[in-house]
Amino acid sequence: MALDTNDVGMQRALKILFAIIERPKHYTRRIFKDFYGTDESRIKKYFEEIKNAGFELDKDDRSRYYLVPNKIFEELISLLVFSPKEEKMILDGLKCNNTPDREIEKIKAKLPRLYDVTKFHHLINQTTLTVMDMLETAKREEKVVILKNYPSTSSNTVKDRYVEAFHIAADEDTIQAYELEDKQVKSFNISRITKIEITETDWTKTGSHNIVITDCFWIQDETVKVRFRMKLGANNYLIQKYPKTRALIKPVPNEKDAYDFEGRVNVKFKELTNFILGHHQDIIEIFEPESLIEHIQNQGKLIWEKKF
């Protein structure tokens, strides 16, 4: 049975989909049936058409629906873009075919510019697509937005942030915005924004809308050069979690599944510390600086001595 071709029917199907995206594991078919005052068969048609459009829905043990993310998009992306492993295979193949080093270096420089799976992962989530649309709308209309219950790892707080979002970098999973409470420009992760509200308040701080330079972990601070070697698992996590690190990572020649990170990061090693401690089994060696080695050792001692 096809979905109603009239506007009301199509609008209801879209509203059902958006409602499930916005509040997963909250709505049942009966709730929608009662809300729209219609019968079960018509609600079933709406769900069928949502599925036919490529959105996979599932339900929990209480028949509350949620969207199953990524399935279709991951299959499509895997056909269109390169993974880190595929890039390494390409370079290894060129070397085996005696391609001149100069040509290999040209291709090697071009590969990181291509969009890969890690640059799409935060856009696949349909809730994030809604957030992106609202951010673009707020930017276009120059309205203050509220990032509801935004979790900050640097300050270890979860609270509403009132911001003027003036720069949106989807491929880096970040926005730069002037935060009204702290009176400064900050970077926010798009993937951490679960709910957003556009207010009626106009921008008043456009003169302060200057893009700030951050390290690959989106931290604004003095920087220090860091160099370490890691295994494939840590590498994959790092570029997925922090897409900007990709430009600083290179495969180790003649060593299988080993990657070197070399670049400047914030001098306090924020975010990098959590990454290294959380993936210590995949960290082969830290080469420099000594201050990073000492910092990680001290953090390890603190964990060892802590009574949980």
Image (spheres, rainbow, N blue to C red):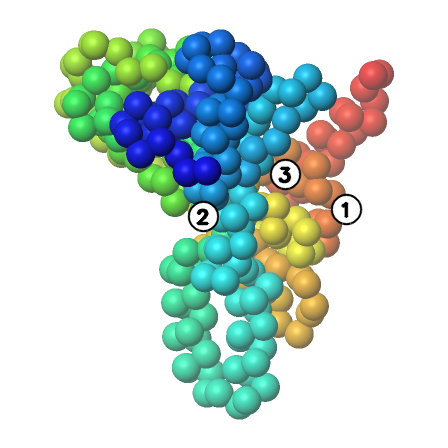
What number is the disc on residue 281?
1
| Residue at horizontal 49 percent and vertical 17 percent from the top | 39
Q: Nearer the viewer, mark 3 or mark 2?
A: 2
Q: Quadrant of the C terminus?
A: top right
Q: Residues within 10 Å of mark 3 (few under 14, many from 20)?
A: some
Tell me: 66 left or right of 104. Answer: right
Please tell me whether mark 1 sits on a helix, a strand or a loop. Answer: helix
Nearer-N-terminus badge (1/2): 2
Nearer-N-terminus badge (3/1): 3
Tell me: 107 left or right of 58. Answer: left
Nearer-N-terminus badge (3/2): 2
| Residue at horizontal 57 percent and vertical 27 percent from the top | 66
**Quarter of the view holding residue 175:** top left
Q: Is residue 183 visible to us here? A: no
- Percent coordinates x, y for residue 45 in the rendering: 48, 31
| Contact (Cβ within 8 Å) of mark 3 with mark 2 | no
Return the residue at label 2. Answer: 119
Q: Residues within 10 Å of mark 1 (few under 14, many from 20)?
A: few
| Residue at horizontal 76 percent and vertical 32 percent from the top | 300
Q: Residues within 10 Å of mark 2 (few under 14, many from 20)?
A: many
Return the residue at label 3. Answer: 275
